[in-house]
Amino acid sequence: MEAIEFIFWEAVKILGLAFLALFSVKAIAGAALRRAWVKPVLYAAVLGLAMTGAWCAGNDVAAEVYMWTCYSDLDKGDPVTAYENALRAVSLRPASLPYWRALVRSKMRLEQLQSALDDAAALQALNGGKLDEVDDYQFTLCSYMLGRYDDVFATTTRLIRANPSYAAPYVLQGLADIAERRYPEAEEIFLAVLRQFPNHQAAVEGLAHAFYLGGERQKALSVLEQTAKLQFSAPARQRFEALKGLYDQ
């Protein structure tokens, strides 16, 4: 849908530019001017404006194509090429928030986590001085993978307070609790997720893992066994069976 909308508005801009250029040329041609040199100057001005407009429209299209190609490369498992395409998009249109998001996503896939965090200021500035909650979560995920758990707790707590129905920060906070060996706190946060979203796979696995690492193997197995009562995808069920085999050893 976004691609169709972009193509539509770019086509409108290009057609509008062509119409204005044609209208201006006809107006100049029909004008009665005393000085003969004025018309060539006006023609040159129209040509210059048309070329500038075409150049800007071309860069808009090129940047958008680079972003689409970036996400396609990520889907194909080629983060290096994705990063190159995202960087080209940002270089063409540095004031466009979606292109920066594509760049951050490709950096995360390349595990350039600190570099991705360094881009937070750019996204914040382009979003009116405040990060979108999804962007904020992405940067918090970088902090988690870098082992900066204090930053994780601070941001996830704020995100949960702002939007209690957004499950991702709960799960990330629980994972940070596990990393810090705060198993009771992790259990509590995963249970909070499952009360709202009973079939949340990451929360199920997190709760089972917190029980297991906390020395409560039977509770971990019970959590996984209870998933039989709920709807999960076939890969999720395979994952649960593998975990049960691990915990039952």
Image (tube, helix red, strand yellow):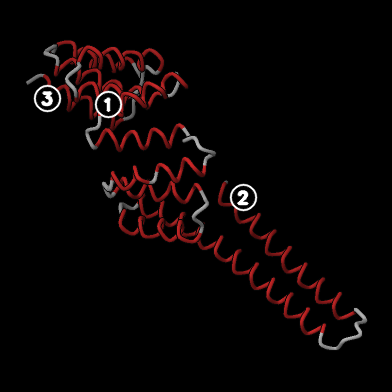
Q: Residue at x 49, y 35 (%)?
A: 130
Of tags 3 and 2, which is closer to the observer?
2
Q: Residue at x 41, y 21 (%)?
A: 160
User: What label sits on residue 67 in the rendered view?
Assistant: none
Secondary element under disc 2, as helix, strand or loop, is helix
Q: Residue at x 74, y 63 (%)?
A: 16
In the rendered image, which residue does mark 3 sit on?
Answer: 246
58 in relation to 89, above or below: below
- Of the 4 image quadrants, the one containing the C terminus is top left
User: What label sits on residue 5 in the rendered view?
Assistant: 2
Dot 2: within a 10 Å radius of its alpha carbon, few (fewer than 14), some, or many (20 or more) residues?
few
Q: CA distance from mark 2 to mark 1?
A: 41 Å
Dot 1: within a 10 Å radius of its alpha carbon, few (fewer than 14), some, or many (20 or more) residues?
few
User: Which percent across, then down, holds residue 192?
Assistant: 35, 13
**Amino acid under label 1?**
Asp
Residue 227: image quadrant is: top left
Total numbered badges shown on the rendered structure: 3
Mark earlier in primary sequence (2, 1) = 2
Q: CA distance from mark 3 to mark 2?
A: 49 Å
Residue 56: image quadrant is: bottom right
Q: CA distance from mark 3 to mark 1?
A: 30 Å
**Amino acid under label 3?**
Leu
Q: From the viewer's perspective, is 199 left or right of 124?
A: left
Q: Which residue is nearer to you in this view: 160 or 227?
A: 160
In the rendered image, which residue does mark 1 sit on?
Answer: 150
Q: Residue at x 23, y 29 (%)?
A: 239
Residue 33: image quadrant is: bottom right
**Amino acid under label 2?**
Glu
Q: Which residue is nearer to you in this view: 239 or 115?
A: 115
Secondary element under disc 1, as helix, strand or loop, is helix
User: Which percent across, then down, holds residue 52?
Assistant: 64, 70
Mark earlier in primary sequence (3, 1) = 1
